Amino acid sequence: MTTTPRPSPASATPPDGPVAPDSWRRHARATALWSGGAALAMLVAAALVAASWSDELPDPVATHWSGSGGPDDFASLGGAIAVGTGIGAASVVLFSVITWFWGRAAQTRRQMAAITIWMAGLISLTLVGMLDQQRGLADAHQADSANAVLLVAVLVPIVPAAVAALLVHPDPPLPATDAVATDAARAPLEPDERAAWVGRASGRTLPAVVLGTTILVVAVAVATQLWGLLAVAAVLTVLLLSMSSFHVRVSAAGLTVRSVFGWPRTTVPADEVERADVVEVSALREFGGYGWRLGRGGRLGVVVRSGEALEVTRTGGRSLVVTVDGAAQAAALLNTVAERARASR
């Protein structure tokens, strides 16, 4: 049994007045513009720096390194810059489009902004670092191993990516104005009875993906002697593990979903729940994979397996899907506390 204080009616509405249900569009477009603009600026800066070294670089320049540690592929300076910035720009445009059209939830916008900045940083530092170590060489075959460059390019952009995520405008409070649908399941609670539901979202697939990915990247690092790839393996392992198991809680406050690492996490206030239901989810078909995902129509998913899931439809055109056992009990209780939240206003 738990009792959670509810905010006063005045606190449910921002001081500037009611929030329009589609206000997310303004925040999504703003996030897409500033994160995409910053990422493109990084790529342009890297291209300009690389071009300014034209008199100091061999022709052609090394663009790929073999398992022995030495370069094994070459291109003109212009070609190297064009390929690097082209791949980077295409990635930035893709992530910005996703943010623009499907960034309904702040959590989605944070994720996309961080990925956009990290990808641009990775490509920019790789391009500049790769060419910097060739400055002053008469022949690109003399270039040193790219291990240090790869290590820096993977790790350093994590910092600005985290800053970008923190700069994303949070979702403003948007209490529901309509009643919870009459056909939505309810929990059999007495009027003065309080309850909480706790579950754990976990599955076997994602841990297997973590293990397989780590082994693959380590094997490639050993085979190619690009030891900087070990940093990639470490980052991927931590990232995937953080999304392999989640604590799920329904209480009078609403829904909370939190990784066993404490982050990522998200909450759905009870007064923003329009309805909660049990659905069947195909992880690959509907969300393209496992973990913290963006699915069809902008649905945010905490998907650790296929099968039974809790789907929460909330105000502002947002929805959250969590693959968790006992979803029927969670949905019924969430609908009940959502109904009570309306009555308390």
Image: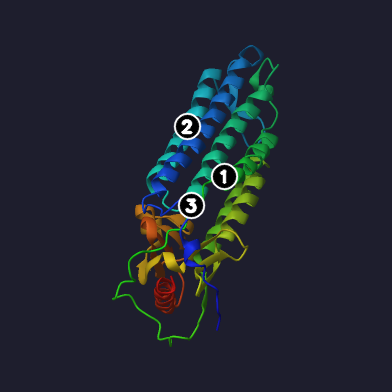
Sequence-first disc among 2 and 1: 2
Instruction: Return the residue found at the far top.
Output: 55
- Identify the mark at residue 228; answer none if there is no mark: none
Report the residue marked by disc 3. Answer: 106
- Identify the mark at residue 89; answer none if there is no mark: 2
Amino acid type, callout 1: Leu
267 displayed left or right of 236: left
Classify 170 as above or below 340: above
Q: Position of residue 40 (x, y in %)?
A: 51, 30
* Label 3 to label 1: alpha-carbon separation: 11 Å
* Label 3 to label 2: alpha-carbon separation: 24 Å
Q: Quadrant of residue 240?
A: bottom right
Q: Which quadrant: the N terminus?
A: bottom right
Front-most of residues 337 and 16:
16
Sequence-first disc among 3 and 1: 3
Callout 2 environment at 10 Å: few (<14), some (14 to 19), or many (20+)? Answer: many
Callout 3 environment at 10 Å: few (<14), some (14 to 19), or many (20+)? Answer: many
Report the residue marked by disc 1. Answer: 167
Callout 1 environment at 10 Å: few (<14), some (14 to 19), or many (20+)? Answer: some
163 displayed left or right of 328: right
Instruction: Return the residue found at the far left.
Output: 183
Q: Position of residue 7 (x, y in %)?
A: 52, 67
Q: Position of residue 242 (x, y in %)?
A: 59, 60
Amino acid type, callout 3: Ala
